Amino acid sequence: MAGQTTSSGIQVHRVPASHGWYWLKRGFGLLGRAPLPLLLLMLMLITASNLFGILGILGLVLAKLVVPVLLVGYLAILRQLAPPGSGTPVAAQSTATPQGAPAPGSRAFTQIFNARVFFGWAQGNRRALLAVAQLGLLSLAIDTGAAWLSGYQDAVAAMFETLSQMPASKVPDAEAMSNLIMPVFQSMMTMAVITVPCYLLLWYAPIFAGLHGLPLLKSVVFSAVAVGRNALAFVCHALCLLVFLISVALVTQVLSGTPALPFASPIFLLVLPVVFSVIACALWACYLDTVEVAGHGSIPPQLRDETDRG
């Protein structure tokens, strides 16, 4: 695989397009190594994001500042499970436990749900915290711009206005509800078309900013370069993620037995921690496969020592 090294010692390997599928496949594998802790952590991230929502605009801003910090902590847990250099590229990996990663059922494995690992990346590292917070504000700007361009707020306002004009004693039938929800769903799809490419270019940015302490601009630029060098693999990965999301949505819609839109079924909302956990694990698998950072290829000594004592 060809590689290109930047001034910060980041080397990006170019991989075949088929690796986009392997990242998702290995994402499931990483989740399977510690399903309960990883799902609990993801549930915490989702809950935190929703709780901030009750504070209105202020809560939205706070969520964009706090949730990225929690996401980097989640990635730090994944680094504990599968540290850089712990295996060959995903295309050639076997089902054996990677060297250096805690095996399921071991005492070290039980310690991955550890606050010191989760928050250790930010301890005494204000530069990394600042970069991650700035990354959160950048994502807020992306979301705000996408909502404005898609007309999402107008669609939601129109839906609630129509509902408020309906008699309280009249329950809308399935067709009426579908007509109400469809404009909102269409605007959400438009938002996805706008935001997905942006977030794809920022794919590596949380790792570069949080775990490697690079400033915001370098994290964004290096992430975009890394994605660009593996554009075909990322197209494949994006398609695999899309198929995965649609498949989960359709299955949960059938299981729920309701005429709700695919991504609005009650069961789909319940399995969101699994969906997001797989995506986060696939992000780490992608990083292991394509990126090397000089001087940052191992777990910090204080965390490694703690794991060894376990």
Image: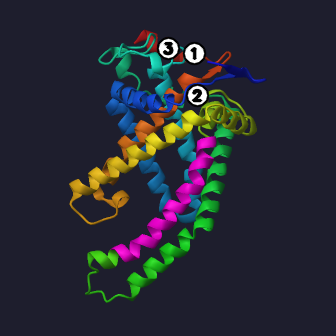
User: Over which residues does the magenta segment extend?
Assistant: 178-201
- Which residue is more in the foreground, 7 or 123? 7
Instruction: Kindly report the secondary structure that dominates the magenta region of the rendered protein.
Output: helix
Neighbor class of circle 3 (other Cα within 10 Å; few <14, some 14-19, many 20+) is: some
- Circles 3 and 1 in contact, beta carbons < 8 Å: no
Q: Which residue is mark 2?
A: 121
Residue 199 shown in magenta: yes
Q: Residue at x 59, y 43 (%)?
A: 200
Q: Residue at x 39, y 33 (%)?
A: 38
Q: Three-letter amino acid code at disc 2?
A: Trp
**Whole-number angstrom distance, CA of label 2 to CA of label 3:** 25 Å
125 vs 45: above or below: above
> Mark 2: which secondary structure?
loop
Q: Which residue is mark 1?
A: 298
Q: Three-letter amino acid code at disc 3?
A: Thr
Of the two numbered discs 1 and 2 on the same chain, state the one appearing first in sequence: 2
Q: Which of labels 3 and 1 is toward the front?
A: 3
**Whole-number angstrom distance, CA of label 1 to CA of label 2:** 12 Å
Report whether 107 appears left or right of 60: left
- Which residue is more in the foreground, 138 or 259? 259
